[in-house]
Image (spheres, helix red, strand yellow):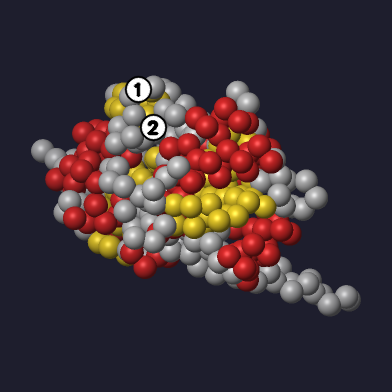
Amino acid sequence: MAKTTVVVVDDSALVRSILTEIINRQPDMTCIGAAADPLVAREMIRNLNPDVITLDVEMPRMDGLDFLSRLMRLRPMPVVMVSTLTERGAEVTMKALELGAVDFVSKPKIGVADGIRLLADDITDKIRIAAKAHIRRAPAPAAPAAPGSPAVAPKPVTVASIGRMSTEKIIFIGASTGGTEATKEVLINLPADCPAVVITQHMPPGFTKSYATRLDGLCKIRVKEAQDGERILPGHGYIAPGGLHLSVERSGANYIARVQDGDPVNRHKPSVEVLFHSAAKVVGPNALGVMLTGMGADGAKAMKVMKDAGAYNLVQNEATCVVFGMPREAINAGAADEVLPLNQIAGKLIERLKATSGISTNRV
């Protein structure tokens, strides 16, 4: 079997050396080049044609995001970002995922060299996933308007209103690799009067707050990082904090968020399995489940439990997934009511809610 070939791009000679060593220790991959900046990397990519590149988020002398943007337009390929765990690093990482990076790893604050070594398994796992990802060419940026020409306002996105809506309904979303952009695609097409949306996206601590803030600025609904004990309200989206499990509980007439530490489930924390099990137990037939792109099987079994409890489940199809792992496992588990392209999921949620007039379904 041919090895996955990797080019490492990082301005630190020490990090380049450590990443090269980690990659070359794996039986299924090899580092074929290490570049100190994107200009050198561009020539390496052209000459060596690697399967995957790792790219430092912040580099001097040339903007890594500008390089990534050009790369995804001209020579789209799998990219894994290596991010610093800072507020600035989180914001840049979210932008990198928006530009087309498959995933990222974050350097702990204990020191770059030690941090990279501690993350060896995470880095190599994500390189393996990236090598199998479906990569699409990014669209070219819009041409600047000619001097003196009138400004044309962008066409507003029309999002259908649902109307009268029961507070009993909740939409549950699970996602992993490629899921930050897939979840955004769903949420920006939901109206302000939709039911609450509760989301578990596999993401480490330090990045979910920046992700929620980015979504909040783009969506009709309000989006925030979930807090333990808060009421789950219609017209709001709640993101599981990185490194903690998110579930829902009932408190009288209200749903509340439960954010807790605990052991990883299916190797993940937060875990989709935890969220979806609570959906089945607490929300039952008033839940709508959505499984988006991601590697592995997290949440598949619990999504079948949701369906058995009366929930209606939508699963993203293979053609539009970055990684068709979690959706495939959900389909194989018999958890899917419909399998749809990503751009049809929000519309189907609205259609389903309107079909039931937003009325809660309480079993006798």
Q: Position of residue 170 (x, y in %)?
A: 34, 43
Element carrying mark 1: loop
Q: Which mark is residue 262?
A: 1
User: Is residue 258 rendered to the left or right of residue 187?
Assistant: left
Image height of 287 relative to 265, above or below: below
Screen quadrant of the C terminus: top left
Image height of 170 relative to 163, above or below: above
Q: Position of residue 36 (x, y in %)?
A: 71, 49
Q: Position of residue 71 (x, y in %)?
A: 63, 64
Residue drawn at x 29%, y 36% as measured from the top left: 266
Residue drawn at x 63%, y 51% as measured from the top left: 34
Dot placed on the residue nearer the N-terminal end, 2 or 1: 1
Disc 2/disc 1 C-alpha distance (Å):
8 Å
Q: Is residue 73 visible?
A: no
Circle 2 is placed at which residue position?
A: 269
- Amino acid found under the numbered disc labelled 1: Gly
Screen quadrant of the N terminus: bottom left
Residue drawn at x 38%, y 23% as measured from the top left: 260
